Image (tube, rainbow, N blue to C red):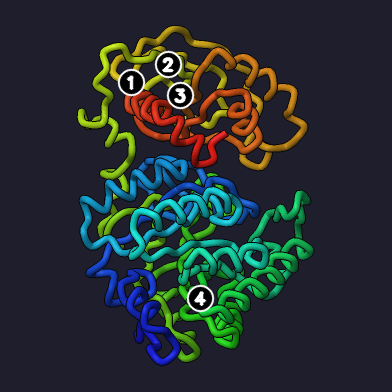
C-alpha cells in the first residue's frame, strides 16, 4: 500500500504523515500514538455501538477506562511523552464524538500545543458537526481527520443509526440519515479544500452495507480523501447489533482488494480504544491510567493534614466500579483522604434508567432529581458511566463526577487525585 502521495502534500504535512501510524503503513511499527478520552458525549446512536466506559480488556472504539478533563489530558500527555520517546501523534476519538464536545477537544489540543509544538494532532468524528467546526479544526493546526461514513443511501443508513441529535432536535429514519450525510459531505469537502488529510472509516456489516461500500469508496475518491479504512463489525454487547455475526478478516480483505483499485486502503487498523496508548499492536492504555499515576508517592501531597472527601460509588457488589449511575439501586458512601477510606453507609436509591436509550429522556426527570438531591452531601460520584443530563445537574450543584472502571479502592484514590486538581480542572472548563 502506498502510504503517501508526496506530490500532493506540503513538506511539513508530508513529514508528519510519515510518522502517523494510522496514515502510514510503515509508521505503525516505529511511532506511537495516544488517544485522549476527553469527549464523552455523542450526537448519534449507531446500532453497532455501546459506549460503556469499561475496563474489561475490550479493544474497540468507544471504550475507555477513564474520562479526562483537558487539564488532566495535558498532564497525561507529559507523563506518556516522558516514558514513550517515539510518541508522535495525539488523537481524540471520543469516547463519544470529538466534535460533540468540541470545547473540550479544542482546549485539549491547544493545551498540548503549548507544551509541544511538534506533536501531530488528529481527531475522529461522525461528521455531523463538521460544517460548523471545520474552520476551527484547520485554525488549530489539525491536519489529519477521520470521518466515519457507513453509507450514501439513506435507506441503508436508517438501518445503521437509531437516531441523530442535531441543534436540539432528534431525527430518525431516512430524515436523520439524509441530514447526517449532507453534513458529512459538506464537512469533508471543506477539509479537503483546506489541505487536511481525511481518512474515511467504514464499518462493514454483512447483508446491510457490504455490497454498497464500493460506491462509498468511489464517492470518497471523487472528493479527494486520502485513504479509506474498511473495518469489520464488532458486535458490541448491549448494542442493537449484538446478535449479528462479526465480519471476518477474509471478507474485509476481499472487499479491500476490490476498493484498492479506486483508492488506497488502510489494512493495519486495530479499531483502537478511546484511551489507547503506544504502538498500534502494543496497546499500553492500562499502564497509563491516571489512577495508576496517582499511586506514585511523588504525586501525593506531602502535607500531613489532608482534606477528607465524601464519595458516592455505584457498584453491584461493592468490589468494582461496574455500574451505570442510572442503574444503581444503592450507593456505597465512602469517606477518605486519598490514602485511607472508610465505608460510612450504604444508601438506597430508586433506579431511574431502564437502558441506554432512556437514560437522558425527560420523562425520567422526577426520579433523577430525587436521586441527585439525595447526593448533595457528597463531594463526588464515582461511577462507570453517567448520562449527560444527570452529570450536568450534579456538576452544576457542585458534585464532581468521576467516570472510571476498576476496583472501588483504586477508583476512590483516582477520584481524590482529580478532586485535588480541581482548580486546574476549573481553569480548563470544568463546571
- Return the x and y of residue 223 as percentages of the image width and height: 59, 84
Q: Nearer the viewer, mark 2 or mark 3?
A: 2
Foreground pick, 110 / 35: 110
Classed neighbour count for the residue bearing mark 2: other residues with Cα under 10 Å, few (<14), some (14–19), many (≥20): some
> Where, quadrant-wise, is the N terminus in this rendering?
bottom left
Q: Which mark is residue 407?
A: none
Classed neighbour count for the residue bearing mark 4: other residues with Cα under 10 Å, few (<14), some (14–19), many (≥20): many
Q: Which residue is mark 2?
A: 309
Q: Which residue is mark 4?
A: 196
Q: Is residue 140 visible from the viewing direction of this image?
A: yes
Residue at x-position 51% and y-position 35%: 426
Secondary structure at numbered mark 3: loop
Q: Which residue is mark 3?
A: 315
Q: Earlier in the sequence, mark 2 or mark 1?
A: 2
Q: Earlier in the sequence, mark 2 or mark 3?
A: 2
Cα–Cα span, label 2 and label 1: 8 Å
Q: How many marks?
A: 4
Asked if the residue at tag 1 contacts the one at tag 4, i.e. Cβ–Cβ closer than 8 Å, the answer is no
Q: Which mark is residue 338?
A: 1
Q: Is residue 188 above or below residue 259?
A: above
Foreground pick, 226 / 103: 103
Q: Earlier in the sequence, mark 4 or mark 3?
A: 4
Q: Earlier in the sequence, mark 4 or mark 2?
A: 4
Q: Earlier in the sequence, mark 1 or mark 3?
A: 3
Would you say 351 lies left or right of 62 here?
right
Classed neighbour count for the residue bearing mark 1: other residues with Cα under 10 Å, few (<14), some (14–19), many (≥20): many
Residue at x-position 46% and y-position 14%: 333
Secondary structure at numbered mark 4: loop
Amino acid at each position: 500500500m502506498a502510504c503517501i502521495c508526496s506530490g500532493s502534500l506540503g513538506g511539513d504535512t508530508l513529514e508528519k504523515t510519515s510518522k502517523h501510524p494510522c496514515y502510514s503503513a510503515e509508521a505503525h511499527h516505529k511511532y506511537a500514538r495516544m488517544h485522549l478520552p476527553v469527549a464523552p458525549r455523542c450526537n448519534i446512536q449507531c446500532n453497532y455501538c455501546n459506549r460503556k466506559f469499561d475496563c474489561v480488556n475490550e479493544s474497540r472504539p468507544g471504550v475507555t477506562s477513564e474520562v479526562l478533563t483537558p487539564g488532566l489530558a495535558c498532564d497525561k500527555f507529559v507523563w506518556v511523552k516522558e516514558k514513550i520517546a517515539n510518541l508522535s501523534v495525539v488523537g481524540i476519538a471520543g469516547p463519544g464524538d470529538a466534535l460533540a464536545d468540541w470545547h473540550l477537544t479544542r482546549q485539549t489540543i491547544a493545551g498540548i500545543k503549548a507544551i509541544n509544538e511538534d506533536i501531530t494532532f488528529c481527531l475522529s468524528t461522525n461528521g455531523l458537526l463538521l460544517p460548523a467546526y471545520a474552520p476551527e479544526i484547520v485554525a488549530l493546526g489539525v491536519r489529519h481527520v477521520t470521518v466515519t461514513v457507513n453509507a450514501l443511501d439513506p435507506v441503508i443508513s436508517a438501518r445503521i443509526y437509531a437516531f441523530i441529535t442535531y441543534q436540539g432536535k432528534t431525527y430518525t429514519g431516512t430524515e436523520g440519515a439524509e441530514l447526517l450525510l449532507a453534513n458529512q459531505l459538506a464537512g469533508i469537502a471543506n477539509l479537503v479544500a483546506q489541505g487536511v488529510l481525511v481518512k474515511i472509516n467504514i464499518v462493514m456489516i454483512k447483508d446491510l452495507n457490504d455490497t454498497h461500500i464500493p460506491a462509498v469508496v468511489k464517492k470518497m475518491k471523487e472528493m479527494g480523501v486520502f485513504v479509506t479504512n474498511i473495518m469489520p463489525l464488532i458486535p458490541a454487547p448491549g448494542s442493537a447489533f449484538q446478535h449479528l455475526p462479526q465480519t471476518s478478516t477474509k471478507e474485509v480483505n476481499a472487499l479491500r482488494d476490490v476498493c484498492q483499485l479506486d483508492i488506497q486502503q488502510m489494512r493495519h487498523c486495530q479499531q483502537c480504544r478511546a484511551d489507547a496508548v503506544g504502538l498500534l499492536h502494543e496497546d499500553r492504555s492500562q499502564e497509563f491510567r491516571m489512577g495508576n499515576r496517582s499511586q506514585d508517592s511523588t504525586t501525593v501531597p506531602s502535607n500531613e493534614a489532608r482534606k477528607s472527601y465524601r464519595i458516592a460509588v455505584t457498584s453491584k457488589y461493592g468490589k468494582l466500579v461496574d455500574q451505570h449511575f442510572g442503574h444503581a439501586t444503592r450507593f456505597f458512601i465512602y469517606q477518605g483522604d486519598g490514602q485511607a477510606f472508610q465505608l460510612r453507609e450504604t444508601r438506597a436509591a430508586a433506579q431511574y434508567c431502564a437502558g441506554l436509550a432512556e437514560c437522558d429522556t425527560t420523562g425520567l426527570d422526577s426520579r433523577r432529581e430525587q436521586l441527585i438531591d439525595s447526593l448533595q452531601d457528597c463531594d463526588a460520584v464515582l461511577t462507570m458511566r453517567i448520562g449527560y443530563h444527570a452529570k450536568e445537574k450534579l456538576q452544576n450543584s457542585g458534585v464532581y463526577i468521576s467516570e472510571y472502571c476498576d476496583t472501588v479502592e483504586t477508583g476512590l484514590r483516582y477520584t481524590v487525585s482529580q478532586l485535588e486538581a480541581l482548580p486546574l480542572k476549573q481553569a480548563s472548563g470544568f463546571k
